[in-house]
Image (cartoon, helix red, strand yellow):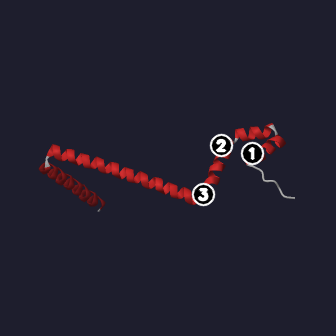
Amino acid sequence: MEQIPTTDADIFRNLINKYGDPAVDFVRKDSDIFIKAGVFALFAANFDKVMEGGRDVLIKLVETGINETGEVIKETTKETVKTLGSTRLFLLITLLCIIYLTYKYIKTRRKE
C-alpha cells in the first residue's frame, strides 16, 4: 500500500488532534525555539548560498565605506589647501611628521 504524502500543515493538525491544548500551549510558549530551529535548518541546508550572500553584502559595505571615506578625505584636503594654501599645508604636514617621529623616538628610548 502506497503512503499518501502529507504536508507540514497536515502533520501539525494531526499533532494538535492527538495532543490537544497542551501541544498548542507548548508551541505558543516555545515559538522562539521553532523559529531558531527553522532559521538554523535553512542556514544548514543552504550554507554555500548564505556564505556567498554574506560575502557579497560585506564586499558591498566595504566598497561603500571606502568610497565614502575617500570622498571625505578628498573634500577635506581641498578645503585645507584652499584655507591654508599649499605652502602652509606642506609646513603643517612636515610638523606633524616631526611630532610623530619624535614620539616614536621617545617611546623606543623608554623601552630601553
Q: Position of residue 105 (x, y in %)?
A: 24, 59
Secondary structure beneath dot 3 equals loop
Which residue bears the numbered disc 3?
A: 46
> Above or below — where is 55 with respect to 83?
below
The mark nearer the N terminus, 2 or 3, is 2
C-beta proximity under 8 Å, tags 2 and 1: no
Which residue bears the numbered disc 2?
A: 32
C-beta proximity under 8 Å, tags 2 and 3: no
Q: Position of residue 52 (x, y in %)?
A: 51, 58
What type is the residue that disc 1 sits on? Answer: Ala
Secondary structure beneath dot 2 equals helix
Which residue bears the numbered disc 1?
A: 9
Query: Residue 12 is drawn in which quadrant?
Result: top right
Give the residue drawn at x 19%, y 55%: 98
Is residue 34 or residue 8 the one in the foreground?
Answer: 8
Which is closer to the viewer, label 3 or label 1?
1
Which is closer to the viewer, label 2 or label 1?
1
Q: How many residues crowd mark 3 within 10 Å: few (<14), some (14–19), many (20+)? A: few
